Amino acid sequence: MSAPRAYRFLLALAAAATVSSSHAAAIASQPFDIGVDMVQVFNDRLGAGRFFAGAGTDRLRVSARVTPSPDTDFYDQSSNGGETAIFVTHPSTPGLDTRLQFVGLQSGGGGGKNDYTTTFNLANPFVQGQLAAWDATPFALRIENPSAPGGETTKWVTAPDYDSSVNLPFLQDVAITGGGLAPTLSWTVPHTTAPITNIRIQLRRIDAEEPGRITAATLVHEAVLPLGSNGYTLDQAFSNGGLPGLPSGLEQGSKYEVAVILESAEPGLIKGRARTFFEFTPLTDDAGDRTIYLPSVDSAGNFNFDIEVRAGETILIDPVVAVGYDYQIGSGDPLFASVTLPNVGDGIFELWLYDLNLADFVFETFLDAGERFDFTGGGVDRFRVLGIEPSAGLDPTDVQAFVTEIGFTGNGRFTGRMTPITTNFTPVPEPSSLALLALAVLALGGLRRSCRAGGSLR
């Protein structure tokens, strides 16, 4: 082809592309009809966590996957997704007209594409009084979208039957093995009388947070695991990796919340669910193949463990880092026998032991990084570690490698917790009354902010 002809050919292609683009732009956005892909009503047990509303409680959840939604506006060129409103009602509960919250991919609420949800706290006396009626007769959903074409701007859907008797357990012995971007997560599933018909894992990238609360997260990966699974290796492409702006795998420097989900279901219908949440940041490649136990982090900032322990053996735990920690066993746990701390900051720490007479911690000794300290007198039920310098730049909301090794006096389970300390507790001269008042006001302010914090429903 000659140069002039080639040039004219390229111009023709460009013109065709321009017309095609203009045509695509003209038809890119249009209103969608109301569509219902899924409705679920089930018992949802939420373990301790910093993201979901109702974490640490048992809920009745009503969820729906409906189009159009803000997700179809973004991914599928609908124009009326933001107008969709969904309400749950029940014939035996006059006045019940609760709106479902959009928690889809564009919400930061952690749900899947086109997801809406709401929950009812099963500990609420009013809800308890309604359960028999809700169990006997299905809920109804009213879906509204005033711009839906075809004249159907309101759609009614009967929800599936709800079974209040299905309850599943939380996982135990949650751990991560291996550094880099393909670590293996592992866990133990306790015995349960309710049948487990499905095991899923969800991985959310933490996009924004504040102390005690993840304020925004994006679902980047979800997978269904074989029944009986006790682990999962993050070495495959993320399920949402093909969507704009979402990664295809783990990324160094990003923080993640993992949910391992046990479900009891009939074909297409969830009857009960239990979700165990834990957080991690990928370790560096040189972390080796050590197995590190991970905590569930609650809204109060406590790190909650449920780990099998044995006398004479030590375990590694990886909490969020701060300037110090209070360690305490759970009821009936073996006592702490030893502790070994990692090399962080200057590698010198303060060990404080609890004095029952003073009802407070008192300084015991300095510990060097890597130095094992054996508690005398048959072990202790609590201790405090201080001395992580603020200058080390350790963020108390960032799950990094402050890997602590602890030993126990006997066999059993460690169901205790660690509480991060973000204030320097080193003794100082007595403050004035005005300074004490200022500290009290600051503490109350933090408490009020914590009490007002909410989270996602999904």
Image (cartoon, rainbow, N blue to C red):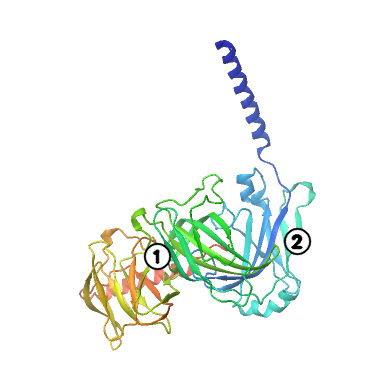
Where on the picture, by quarter, is residue 86? bottom right
Where on the picture, by quarter, is residue 62? bottom right
With respect to residue 109, does 73 lie above or below?
A: above
Secondary structure state at the residue bearing disc 2: strand
Label 1 to label 2: alpha-carbon separation: 48 Å
The picture places residue 38, in percent across and down from the top left corner, at 69, 59
Q: Is 53 displayed left or right of 85 in the figure?
A: left
> What residue do we see at 59% from left, 76% from top?
192
Q: Confirm whether residue 49 shows in the render.
A: no
Question: Which residue bears the numbered disc 2?
Answer: 157
Q: Residue furthest bottom?
A: 357
Q: Is there CB contact under 8 Å for labels 1 and 2?
A: no
Q: Is 189 displayed left or right of 147 in the figure?
A: left
With respect to residue 27, does 411 lie above or below?
A: below
The picture places residue 212, in percent across and down from the top left corner, at 43, 66
Along the viewing direction, whichever of 151 and 351 lies nearer the viewer: 351
- Mark 2 closeness class: few <14, some 14–19, many ≥20 residues within 10 Å: few
Question: Which residue bears the numbered disc 1?
Answer: 291
Which mark is first along the chain, 2 or 1? 2
State the quadrant of the C terminus: bottom right
Along the viewing direction, whichever of 98 and 272 lies nearer the viewer: 272
Where on the picture, by quarter, is residue 131? bottom right
Type of the residue with mark 2: Val
Along the viewing direction, whichever of 144 and 67 lies nearer the viewer: 67
